[in-house]
Amino acid sequence: HFLIRKLIQKYKMYEVKTIGDSFMCVCMQPSTAVKFAIGLQHAFQHFDWGSDAINEAYATQLEKEMDPAVWNGLRVRIGMHYGYGDIKLDPTTKGYDYYGTVVNTAARIESVCHGGQIGISQAMLEELDTHSLDLVWMDLGEQELRGLSEKIHLYQLLPKGAMEMRMFPPLRLDKAQELQLEEDNKDGSPRRASKAGSVISSRGGYAPEKDDLALWAECHHLVSSGVMSAEELWHNYQVGLTTMNTILSSQPPKDKAQMVESLCTRLHVRYYGDKGAKLKKSLHGLIDRVLPATGPHLLQPLHKELERRMSRNSDC
């Protein structure tokens, strides 16, 4: 999060809120939003992640080597839209919250992108001078996005240079549909459209809300025994969660479920299920099991599980 917040400050963005590991930000000028998004991709690309484990995991799951000049470390997806949202002062946080179709559109664009990809609407593109911003764009066509009444024309942006060589699979439209079904089936009735997202929406994967885990962190034995502070525990938890989400995000639903269940069995963690809140509880148990060692250490059993599955598939 510190990489993102450093850029928020640099470009004078307004951080509305975070939802799990997703940031919701707004700004006055579309060009500023794009500079922020490009800067974010550069920051993640050039950051020293302290290990090659993340890159190795990507190479394993995608079954190909990654050019380090093009791909490095964790990947964040970004969705952007241009327009005027409804604004309301939150009496609790004393900050401004944003609502409405513009906000939801940015969130929906982000949800269908892949890690390392920047997706924008036609309304956003029309406000930009792509030449002066030193970027390249690609037409992704009209798409029907979850929760929106009309199709929306999408484009992909990438900075010129090595990163413009990034190639992505088709948009994650099937993932968005799966998410909608999960939301509708949780309590048997459709839920309201999410308010996550605005001009900028960036996200990495699933995550329990921080408020839900505040008491857990404060009462954790690693905190009470003085091994680390609650803040350090929360940071390690987020590192572990991001690592898990990064590896699992591109797996087919069936393989993802089998992988999580197998890891729970091997690490003696209760397996709750592979959908919605049950998946979150399973991931929470896995991360809690390996604390305080997360990040590359958490990757080891998952990396071995990936290798075992790939070996079994090749033998077949």
Image (cartoon, rainbow, N blue to C red):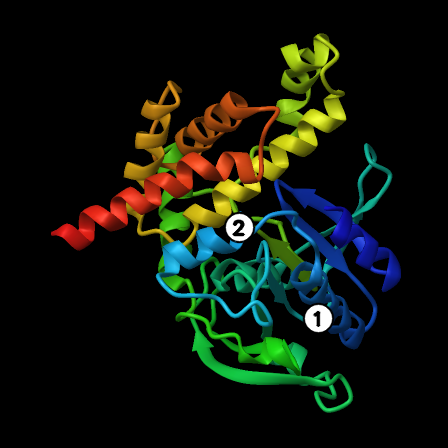
Check disc 2: other Cα within 10 Å, few if <14, some if 14-19, many if 20+: many
Q: Hey, which residue is sitting farthest left in the picture?
A: 316
Q: Foreground: 266 or 1?
A: 266
Horizontal and vertical percent position of residue 156:
56, 77
Give the SS element for disc 1.
Answer: helix
Which residue is drawn at the image coordinates 45% and 71% (left, top)? Answer: 168
Which residue type does callout 2 highlight? Ile
Which residue is drawn at the image coordinates 48% and 66% (left, top)? Answer: 66
Please give the residue where the numbered disc 2 appears in the rendered image.
Answer: 54
Q: Hey, which residue is sitting farthest bottom in the picture?
A: 131
Seen in the image, is 150 located left or right of residue 229? left
Which residue is drawn at the image coordinates 75% and 83% (left, top)? Answer: 133
Picture quadrant where residue 175 is located: bottom left
Does residue 130 sit above or below 152 in this rendering?
Answer: below
Q: Is residue 193 visible?
A: no
Picture quadrant where residue 172 is located: bottom left
Horizontal and vertical percent position of residue 309:
26, 45
Which residue is drawn at the image coordinates 45% and 48% (left, top)? Answer: 247
Does residue 205 sit above or below 46 in this rendering?
Answer: above
Q: Is residue 180 visible?
A: yes
Does residue 32 sit above or below 40 in this rendering?
Answer: below
Q: CA distance from mark 1 to mark 2?
A: 21 Å
Seen in the image, is 252 located left or right of residue 228? left
Horizontal and vertical percent position of residue 146:
45, 59
